[in-house]
Amino acid sequence: HNLISCTMESSELWNVKNLKPPPVMTIKQNIQEKDGTTLRNIISEACLAFKNHSTFEQEAAFLSRFTYCMKTKLRHCKGLKTIAKVNQALLRYLRMNVLHHLETFSHALPETYSDVMYMPARNMLLYLLVRLQGFGKLMVRLVETTQVAASTLEQLITLGHMWKIYFLAYGIVSRIYTLSRNIAKYTCRLYSLLLPFVPVLQNSTVNWLPKSYILPKDLHLWLETDCLDDLPENVPTDKPFLSLLNCDMGDSDEELFIDRANIEKVTPVHSVEDKPERTTEDLGIPVLQNSNVKKRRKKKKKDTKLNLQTVDDLKLFEKDFKSNPEKYSDNFKKLDKMQCSMLHKLVLKCLKKSLKSVNNPVIVDACLAEVRSALSCL
C-alpha cells in the first residue's frame, strides 16, 4: 500500500496537459517468469488494440470536416456548438498519443525471461497508469458530450428543417459514441490489469510520482459515471423515432404507385374525381368586393405658362422667379443651381436692355425673343 500512495501536489497529475515522463530505465531484478510473460502479453495486446483505432480516427476526421464545412452555414445553430465540443475532445485524444507510451514501455521489456533480468523501472509503469487515468477521464468526457450532441440533433431532425444535414451529423456522432464508449471500457480493464504489477517492479533511488498521490484501485469507480454501464439490447417502444416514409405532406390528390418489379421507377397515379354537373340556373354575374369603391385620382399640377409679350410681363417674371423659384419648379426640372443662376442673369440682362430702350420697339422685341428662346430650349 505504501508503494502506491505518495504525496499530492496542488495539481492533479492525470489532468496535466504536458506531463513530463520519467527517464527510460531498466533495472536488474529478480522476477518470476510467469509475471514477466503476463506483463508482456498485456502490453502487446494493448498496443494491438490501440493500433486498431483507424475506424475511430476516420469518424473523427468526418466530424472535423463536417464542422469545418458547416461552421458558416450553421453558425447560429445550437447543434453545431455541441458538435464542436465533441471535435475538441477528439483533438485532445489525438494529442495524448497513448500508443506511443505503450510502445515505449513495451520496448523496455525483455524478449526472454530468466530468474534475473533487466525490467522497466516502476516509475515507467506509474507514468503509464497516470496517463491511462487521464485518458479514461477524456473518454468519459467524449461519451457524455456525444450524448448531449445526439439529443440536440434529434430535436433538430424532428423539426424537419435541413434534416438531411442533421441526419448525417447524427450518424457520425452516434458511431463516435459507440466507439469511444468501448475504448473507455477497455481503458478501465487495462488499468486494472497493470495496477498489480506496481509492487512487482523495482524502482530507482528517485521517485517520479509525488508523495501521497493515491492511484485509484478501480478506475471505473473513480470515474464516477453511469455511461459505461451495460445498456439493454432491446428497448421496447410503441412510438417510432422518425418516420419519413409514412408522412403526409398534404398531397392527397396524387399518390405514388411503386412497381415491385422495377423499384427505381415511380409512376404517379391520379385519383379520378366526379366532375360537377353543369346547371342551367342563372347564378348572376360575379361582383368584386372592390368594384364600387371609387379610386382616388391624383391631382395633376398645373404647368405655369410663360407668356412674355411686353416689358411689364418680363419684369413680373423676373420678380417672381427671384422671390419664389418653387413656382416654376415644374418648368425647370432639368436645371441645376448653376443653370438657374445663368438663366436669371440672362433675364436680368435682357430686362435692363429693354428698359433702356423702351421707345425702340425693335430692341424690346429682340430682348423678349431672346428670353423666350432660352426658356423654350429647357
Image: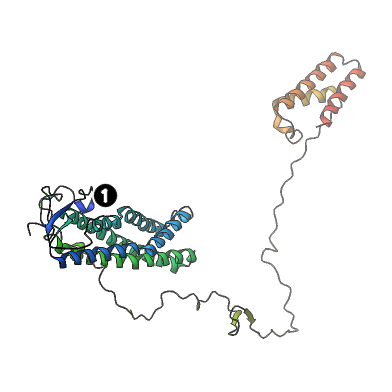
* Secondary-structure class at tag 1: loop
Quarter of the figure with the C terminus: top right
Front residue of this view, candidates 351 and 250: 250
Where residue 68 sits, quadrant-wise, is bottom left
Front residue of this view, candidates 31 and 343: 31
Q: Position of residue 185 (x, y in %)?
A: 26, 67
Indicate left or right for 25 with 324 as reference: left
Indicate left or right for 242 with 203 as reference: right
Q: Amino acid at mark 1?
A: Lys
Residue at 72%, 33% (x, y): give it: 327
Farthest top residue? Answer: 356
Identify the colour scheme used: rainbow
Quarter of the figure with the N terminus: bottom left
Residue at 69%, 53% (x, y): give it: 296
Q: Which residue is mark 1?
A: 17
Q: Position of residue 135 (x, y in %)?
A: 26, 58
Q: Position of residue 71 (x, y in %)?
A: 45, 53
